[in-house]
Amino acid sequence: MTGTLARLGAWTIARIARIGHGARFFARLLWLSPAALLRPRLVIDQLHVIGNRSLSIIAVSGLFVGFVLAFQGYYILQRYGSAEALGLMVALSLLRELGPVVSALLYSGRAGTSLTAEIGLMKAGEQLSAMEMMAVDPMARVLAPRFVAGVIAMPVLATIFSAVGVLGGWGVGVLLIGVDPGAFWSQMQAGVEVFKDLGNGVVKSVVFGFICTFTALYVGHEAQPTPEGVSRATTTTVVASSLAVLGFDFILTALMFGAE
């Protein structure tokens, strides 16, 4: 019994210490982020790597999600004689929920794993240690620009996802099914509120950008400097980021729309 309590206590202490270490890591990233903006070339390069190279999967996924939403929404709405509200349903579903969440999940699988593998391999190759030997802070030079670029890229990618999804819903609803185009756009224009719907979606995507980018950088920085350690770190990044995104999505949705 004493041994079990000792192991439980040691496990609890280790978890608390890890949480504290992660919190200090996050605080230091936030502290160094404004200075990273003074090196715009580094941030722009990472925006290209993180954002531009993720654009294709975001756009294609948004298009097909819009297709599916239009099909499913039409056959549900027509039961109640509300097929003209298809545009509003597609837009609200994408702006409020699917755009930020699906974009974050795709971002964690595409850019997050890339960041984790890159930082993990730099650690395994002792490049981060070499920077410290040359009096260069690797967090300021390597991690902070990637963190800033990820936080900037995530809302842009989510917005593109939602915009392409709306166009996909229009293509299926208007061109394929035959919904009146005037009703499609007018219902959307009348029902979507900029601050409540679009603004809340942007807030979600910014929060998810913080979560996914920080998780990728932290897991990569703390990975064991071996091929197996880097491999496990990339898997951990996807799992941890996805669970965190879904959990925070519930919390943010409850805060934003719970009072309606």
Image: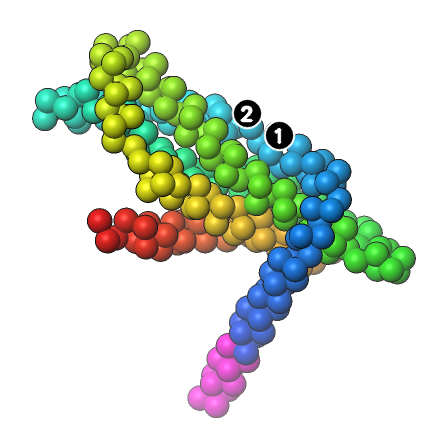
| Residue assigned mark 1 | 53
What is the number of the mark on residue 56?
2
Separation (CA) of disc 1 from disc 2: 7 Å
Give the residue drawn at x 53%, y 74%.
Answer: 16
Point out residue 61 in the picture as x, y percentages from the top left corner: 45, 27
Q: Main secondary structure of the magenta part?
A: helix
Q: Measured along the vertical axis of the image, is residue 60 above or below residue 1?
A: above
Give the residue drawn at x 45%, y 29%.
Answer: 161
Point out residue 111 in the picture as x, y percentages from the top left corner: 59, 39
Asked if marks 1 and 2 touch (Cβ < 8 Å), the reply is yes
Q: Measured along the vertical axis of the image, is residue 253 above or below residue 153?
A: below
Q: In the image, 71: left or right of 120?
A: left
Instruction: Give the farthest residue toward the bottom.
Output: 2
Packing grade of label 1 (10 A; few <14, some 14-19, many >=20) is few
Q: Nearer the viewer, residue 230 or 45?
A: 45
* Magenta-tinted stretch: 1-12
For the residue marked with disc 1, what is the amino acid? Arg
For the residue marked with disc 2, what is the amino acid? Ser
